[in-house]
Image (cartoon, rainbow, N blue to C red):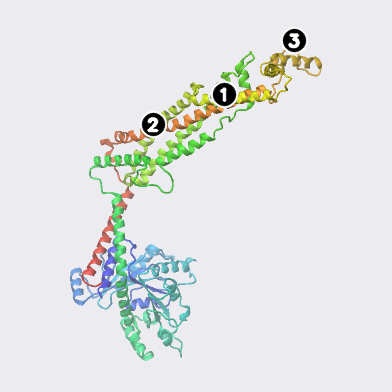
Amino acid sequence: MEALIPVINKLQDVFNTVGADIIQLPQIAVVGTQSSGKSSVLEALVGRDLLPRGTGVVTRRPLILQLVHVDPDDRRKTSDENGIDGEEWGKFLHTKNKIYTDFDEIRLEIEAETERVSGNNKGITDEPIHLKIFSPHVVNLTLVDLPGITKVPVGDQPKDIEVQIKDLILKHISNPNSIILAVTAANTDMATSEALKLAREVDPDGRRTLAVVTKLDLMDAGTDAMDVLMGRVIPVKLGLIGVVNRSQLDINQKKSVADAIRDEYAFLQKKYPSLANRNGTKYLARTLNRLLMHHIRDCLPELKTRINVLAAQYQSLLSSYGEPVEDQSSTLLQLITKFAAEYCHTIEGTAKYIETTELCGGARICYIFHETFGRTLESVDPLGGLTTIDVLTAIRNATGPRPALFVPEVSFELLVKRQVKRLEEPSLRCVELVHEEMQRIIQHCSNYSTQELLRFPKLHDAIVEVVTSLLRKRLPVTNEMVHNLVAIELAYINTKHPDFADACGLMNNNIEEQRRNRMRELPSSVPRDKAAGGGFQGEQEGGGTGNWRGMLKKGDEGSAGDKSSNPASPQRGHAVNLLDVPVPVSRKLSAREQRDCEVIERLIKSYFLIVRKNIQDSVPKAVMHFLVNHVKDSLQSELVGQLYKAGLLDDLLTESEDMAQRRNEAADMLKALQKASQVIAEIRETHLW
């Protein structure tokens, strides 16, 4: 099982090659406040001085530290192959294959790389530094050194440095595959430990938290850490281990880590003899190694599943990006054919990608025909914009200078044409809405149905232009046809239409019934023939329709009665100027006038409903024939004719730089995932898992 940690290191190397952190690998995250001895603990585990020192926030980027145990035989072989002089060396990911045998150089490189990315203003960043240490004196571990927790910004540190550091730490310790190494100084109150507080936020049960108590030798005189080390103060399930750090004086005097570990052992034997074998740096290293191995073993099943799922996703993503173009003619023809087919399928409702959030394609066209257009026509009032005075005026104008015995048919035609004309605007608007939807289908096909087009932006733009041009050419033709449909209805008012004839017959029956009712209401002393003609005669004599003698007679009487008071009254011997007489805007209609207007209005309404029914049926048919079906039938031939040309192949099939980059990234990630899957498969074969 010891070999599990190198396997995780190998997986880390695999994903480092693609610069991805999509897989959360098992590792140990080191958390502690500034000056808690966190860096000293790490250096004690490595056995060498390699971390930057100073005041304030020194660790400003996560340092992923992989400790690789090297056997003496392997070390000699590696030294001979790479020309390494020494038994310990280090490698950074960002410096590729450069070997560092001087640990002072490693420390300087950490400082330089930190300033290169984070700047020199004490700011922090979450981009990690990857460092591998090869040594025969270390155990296999993967540690993440995180910035020390601070409360108050110092110097030119950002004002929100506390929040930045906390967010960065939480990002790493929230990884369920990580072990939290919470470092706290023994000369502080464990109950107020910031490291343990943050650990509890993401690991409330403490199942993956190990506490380390540093600076055991700096506790106040007369006190000890026995209760703390026994777990009586803060119980931690993975345990609590005490260590002794090098003091700043020891560091200044270049005291080696090996000497410090020997002094630590002596201190524990003297101060805590009963606990000495369960504390100290060496015991901490063995414990971390054991915990990490068991943790890796528990995480591997889920890790394997995660890698397989991601491999399938990236395989699908890579397939959607398509392979590099080899046969340009064939590729262009396939893309054009596929787009045309998907466009038609979207109209017919058989597209592979069905929109679920809104109507589109043929479904929206159907909605436009039967809901939008249909309801708009039904909302058009047959008598809208037509007043009773308009009807009466039309009747009078149609009679000319002669009084009319019957309602003139010309007035009906004049008025009904005016009303039918109102159906043209919503009909043309219906064409416009369908045209807009046909335009929207282009974008729908580009986004959902033919993602390959995204690889070739120039081809995509060219296809959009061709289809838009085709739709633009069909729009005036369709509008003309719809205009003609209304013009056809206006060209001949068919009063012999069966539905209209039935309405007229019913209307005549109603009028005759009303006449008989009036006859029955007359006194018995009035002769029926007199009553039948008296009404009409009275209307003529009372100034009814067409009785100009009555009007002139009343005008003469009025002028004779008061010539001086009416300046517009004609004087004897002068011509009468009728234009000077104001026409009344509204007045009470006579029975004859009211009856004539009602007849005309009923006829208009009846005929208008017939025409509206025809328009509601014929306009969608015309739009389908002249616009929708024509575009469907001629789309592919139009695209091929316009785009399938030898001189355009290179230009149209030029891939976008973004697409080529994404394909390469997806291919690299898929390769890394497949390699990681192979590494895990090897674990099963060697029975390590």
* Residue 589 coordinates in the image, percent (x, y): 68, 24
Q: Amino acid at mark 1?
A: Leu
Residue 537 in the figure: left or right of residue 246? right
Q: CA distance from mark 1 to mark 3?
A: 38 Å
Give the crowd class for mark 3: few <14, some 14-19, many >=20 residues within 10 Å.
Answer: few
Mark in the foreground, 2 or 3: 2
Mark earlier in primary sequence (2, 3): 3
Do the residues bearing badges 2 and 3 touch, measured as CB atoms within 8 Å? no
- The amino acid type, in three-letter code, at marker 2 is His
Q: Which residue is mark 1?
A: 415
Circle number at residue 36:
none
What is the secondary structure assignment of the residue under circle 3? loop
The alpha-carbon separation of the residues under discs 2 and 1 comes to 32 Å
Residue 361, percent from left and from top = 40, 41
Residue 225 drawn above or below residue 13? below
User: Residue 310 is drawn in which quadrant?
Assistant: bottom left
Eye-nearest disc, 1 or 3:
1
Q: Which residue is mark 2?
A: 625
Q: Which residue is mark 3?
A: 574
Q: Position of residue 219 (x, y in %)?
A: 44, 86
Count of numbered circles in the view: 3
> Which residue is outermost to the front?
524
* Real-space CA distance between mark 2 and mark 3, rounded to the nearest whole angstrom: 67 Å
- Is disc 2 placed on a helix, strand or loop? helix
**Residue 256 visible in the snapshot:** no
| Sequence-earlier tag: 1 or 3 | 1
Regarding mark 1 in the picture, which secondary structure is present there? Answer: helix
Residue 274 visible in the shown view: yes
